[in-house]
Image (spheres, coloured by chain):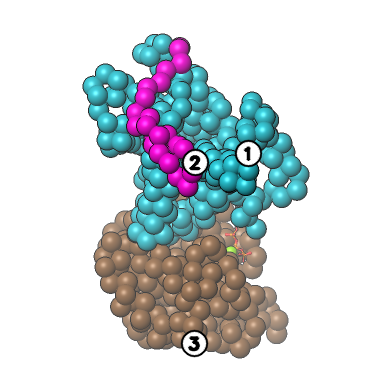
Amino acid sequence: MLQIHNINTFYGKAQALYDLSLSVEASEIVALVGSNGAGKTTLLKTLSGLLRPASGRVVFLEKRIDGRPSYAVVEAGISHIPEGRRLFPDMSVRENLEMGAYLQRAWKQKGESLEEIYRLLPVLKAREGQLAGTLSGGEQQMVALGRGLMSKPRLCMIDEPSSGLAPVMVDEIFHIIEGLRDQGIAIFLVEQNVRHTLEIADRAYVIENGRIILAGKSEQLLSEELIRKAYLGL
Amino acid sequence: MGSYMMVTILDVVISGLLLGGIYAVTAVGLSLQYGVARVLNIAHGEFIMLGAFITYSLYTRFGINPLICFAICGPLVFAVGFILYRTLFTRLRMSSPTPGAFEGNSMLACFGLLFIIQNVAILIWGADIKGYTYLAFPVDLWGARFAANRLVTLGFALAICLVFYLFLANTRLGKAIRAAAQDPDTAGLMGVRINQVLALCFGFGALMAGLGGALISISYKIQPTMGLEYTMIALIVIVLGGLGSIPGSFVGGLVLGLVGSIVTHIEPGLSLVAYYVIFMLLLLIKPTGILGK
Ligand SMILES: Nc1ncnc2c1ncn2[C@@H]1O[C@H](COP(=O)(O)OP(=O)(O)OP(=O)(O)O)[C@@H](O)[C@H]1O
Ligand SMILES: [Mg+2]
């Protein structure tokens, strides 16, 4: 459903992504793993229109989306749940979720969508009126997830949802993400928690210095020598 | 004696709220332009002046009720602001490498605007002080007497702020504006058309300035060079209220108006000085503003 062909992205003169290609099919979890500064966030920003690729093509559901502004990418059905949650701190939990339904077609159904999100993430219901800036890290990640689902996306791109969370919370977040796939939402998951990620992902890509250096099925990668040494510390 | 004292206090408070209401309207406008659209609009006072003179002309030339003039000069200055942002500032924003560079560039552009608008106004209306009388009859309030126009002005100022607050709190576009103020990139990820929303904010800022100007023209004398003082005051108010905070600008405006009125009562002519003193103290003690964190 998502095909990326030979993307090159720069920050000023510094190149961050080199001829990067990958794809995500409907109802699969595809992971992108790599160390700090490898270019993971840069790729997501390039896909969601926060950065423009210098060259290359991005096709989503048969439509070109490269170089399109962010709102057009959401409209096309891709939701980007950014690194560091990026909630609106001076808005309540409920208002943050409503912002996720900003698209005209989603806004009309925001009441029902809210109910669905509260069923999926019951902690949010209890925190409805609280300012997002005052939530704990785990709760904030829940809001970020919920907000990213309010637009009823076909594909969710999630940037490091487990970062800074306690192990129990990480388990819960990963469990929720698996549940989303089972509901038919494709997931493009960026993570540094490689072991856990490969356990839930169907396929994965490894990125280093802006280039994909390895790709394959998760089970395959888990037994790969390079992965075991560099990312799993075995 | 006691009742004389009461009447004096009432007089100072109502005058302060009147001044404060006008400050609040104009500061909320500047807060939208600076806090959301990131343009430190040095020409804000010129939009206030435009609102004042358009109302003046419509009333003295064509006899149109100043309160109805709101409906004419409001949309007019809104359109000027919106178009300016779509043409000039959007382009500047795209061509500025960083948000900081954009703030600098746009402020320089606003300096240019200031001179252009002011000189055009002098060409049209001349450089003299102007004024008109409207609803000048006195009204008794608990023993104190006020010109009716001042009470009407105060009522309108508060109503404008209230309506705008409800708009921001409850409508889809209002929420988009608040989201864009907090984090424009993330607002974009939600589907907000950020260029359009920023232009609307700049337009709304101009609208508030225009309405503020119209209100000023009802109770005070006006002049094409009046803008700078109001720009400075609006700047002080948005710092007082906490940069980017709309409720803060509202409260800050009322507070500054009250201070101005008290100082004027004691020693007329010192109110501007008092504003600067408050401003300096605030910068030293609590630079995040009264409602800031
Ligand atoms: N705004 C920016 N300006 C200039 N260079 C940047 C900018 N953001 C990122 N970079 C550079 O681009 C490269 C890729 O960064 P990116 O944030 O995509 O890494 P990442 O894989 O997401 O890392 P992390 O796991 O730490 O989030 C890094 O070398 C980084 O220094
Ligand atoms: Mg990152």
Left or right? Give the position of B289 relative to B128.
right
- Per the rendering, the mark at residue B144 is 2
Question: Within 8 Å of ligand 1, the CB of disc 2?
Answer: no
**Coordinates of residue B8 in the picture (x, y in percent):** 58, 40
| Vertical position of residue B267 compared to residue B203: above or below | above
Q: Nearer the viewer, residue B218 or B22?
A: B218
Q: Are marks 2 and 3 on the same chain?
A: no
**Coordinates of residue A181 in the picture (x, y in percent):** 39, 82
**Coordinates of residue B59 in the picture (x, y in percent):** 29, 24
Q: Nearer the viewer, residue A83 or B84?
A: B84
Give the residue at x 59% y 37%: B261
Work out whether residue A160 can be spotted. yes
User: Which of the image's four quarters has the C terminus of chain A?
Assistant: bottom right
| Vertical position of residue B76 compared to residue A201: above or below | above
Q: Which residue is mark 3?
A: A175
Q: Are marks 2 and 1 on the same chain?
A: yes
SS of the residue under disc 1: helix
Say what amino acid the circle numbered 1 marks: Ile
What hue represents chain A?
brown
**Magenta residues?**
B127-150
- Per the rendering, the mark at residue B16 is none
